[in-house]
Image (cartoon, helix red, strand yellow):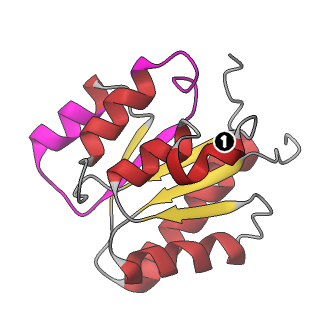
Amino acid sequence: MSAPRNGDILIVEDNPSDAELTLRALHKARVANGIHVVQDGAEALEFLFAKGAFAGRAGATTQLVLLDLKLPKVDGLEVLRKVKSDPRTKAIPVIVLTSSREEKDLMASYDLGANSFIVKPVESEKFFDAVKEIGLYWLLLNEPAHG
């Protein structure tokens, strides 16, 4: 198994309950990475491209993005499109973690370069377990692209 990497994890989630559950699950999985939560797509793009309030994080790396689709300001599909079309960020794994079960959202996410599409389980315990598994796989087992 690979050693843990130390890039940041970005959680893009406008539902405070889901964001809190995601944080608790990652901590329970003993994820040591820096974890940042933003509540809309515009803030996610500022974080990823080190602009606006996040201009001081130049040089910091993001190792994983957990992205909701239904977001205020800039929706998740637009965030995904911008991340995967920019050479600076296209290699970052983006996991769509959404309540949407719509086929069009699934297809659009993969067409835009999502690395995984996971429908949030309704039960909080199953959601918690799903996030723990995501953290373990993407942060410990998966070998990221370098670029």
Q: Which residues are magenta?
A: 85-109
Q: Is residue 43 left or right of residue 100?
A: right
The image shows residue 69, relative to residue 92, as above or below, that is below
Q: Residue at x 65, y 42 (%)?
A: 62
Residue 136 versus residue 40: which sits nearer the camera?
A: 40
Type of amino acid at the residue the image marks with label 1 = Gln
Is residue 135 found inside the magenta-colored segment of the image? no
Q: Residue at x 50, y 59 (%)?
A: 11
Residue 32 versus residue 42: which sits nearer the camera?
A: 42
Residue 118 appears anywhere in the view: no
Q: Position of residue 71 (x, y in %)?
A: 25, 58
Q: Is residue 65 left or right of residue 103?
A: right
Quadrant, the N terminus = top right
Judge the density around disc 1: few (<14), some (14-19), many (≥20) Cα neighbours within 10 Å: many
Residue 55 appears anywhere in the view: yes
Q: Is residue 70 left or right of residue 9?
A: left
Identify the residue position indicated by label 1 in the image. 63
Q: Residue at x 22, y 57 (%)?
A: 70
Residue 141: quarter of image: top right
Q: Position of residue 53 (x, y in %)?
A: 55, 54
Considering every residue shown, the one lying at the far right of the view is 3
Residue 72 versus residue 13: which sits nearer the camera?
A: 72
Q: Position of residue 79 (x, y in %)?
A: 34, 39
Q: Is residue 1 left or right of residue 49?
A: right
Is residue 87 found inside the magenta-colored segment of the image? yes
Q: What secondary structure is found at the residue carrying circle 1?
A: strand
Q: Position of residue 46 (x, y in %)?
A: 48, 45
